[in-house]
Amino acid sequence: MPDRSDAPHLPRSAPIEAYGKGGFAFDDMSHRGSLLCLPDAIWAWPVTKPEQIDRDSLQRVFAAANSIDTLIVGTGTEVWLAPSELREALRAVKVVLDTMQTGPAIRTYNIMMGERRRVAAALIAVP
């Protein structure tokens, strides 16, 4: 039996309905903190700033890479360019990385989900 930290918030994907005040709303639920949205589940994500985004923080993305074509990273209110090593590692598992601030990232993620595309999102919470 997985412990609580290994349990997803939601065992499927869902559009993000709202964000701000340090969290997100989705599927009639709310969560404080950052989120990792994969095709099969939505998880709490301990990242609070773009500099923390690396292969380790995206471990679940790499594990699910065979079901993801695009990873959208919402970088909070900052603009961030992913290190080339991270881009190359994702490219090696055939996942395209697209980074932008969290607001546009949510809108893009929701549109791509609506189009039934194989998309994941790593979203840093904004105040």
Image: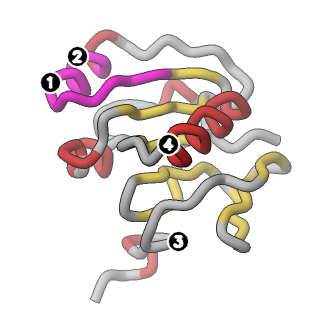
Q: Amino acid at mark 1?
A: Ala
Earlier sequence position, callout 1 versus callout 4: 1
Residue 71's image quarter? top left
Q: Amino acid at mark 3?
A: His
**For mark 3, what is the residue?**
9
Q: Position of residue 31 (x, y in %)?
A: 68, 64
In the rendered view of the protein, which quadrant contains the C terminus? Answer: top right
Cα separation, mark 3 vs mark 4, equals: 23 Å
**For mark 4, what is the residue?**
115
Cα separation, mark 2 vs mark 3, equals: 30 Å
Closest to the observer: 34 or 95? 95
In the rendered view of the protein, which quadrant contains the N terminus? Answer: bottom left
Q: Position of residue 80 (x, y in %)?
A: 56, 15
**For mark 2, what is the residue?**
88
Query: Height in image: 96 above or below 110?
Result: above
**For mark 1, what is the residue?**
92
Residue at 43% of width from left, 16% of height from top?
Answer: 82
Circle 2 — which element?
helix
Q: Position of residue 26 (x, y in %)?
A: 67, 63
Q: Amino acid at mark 2?
A: Glu
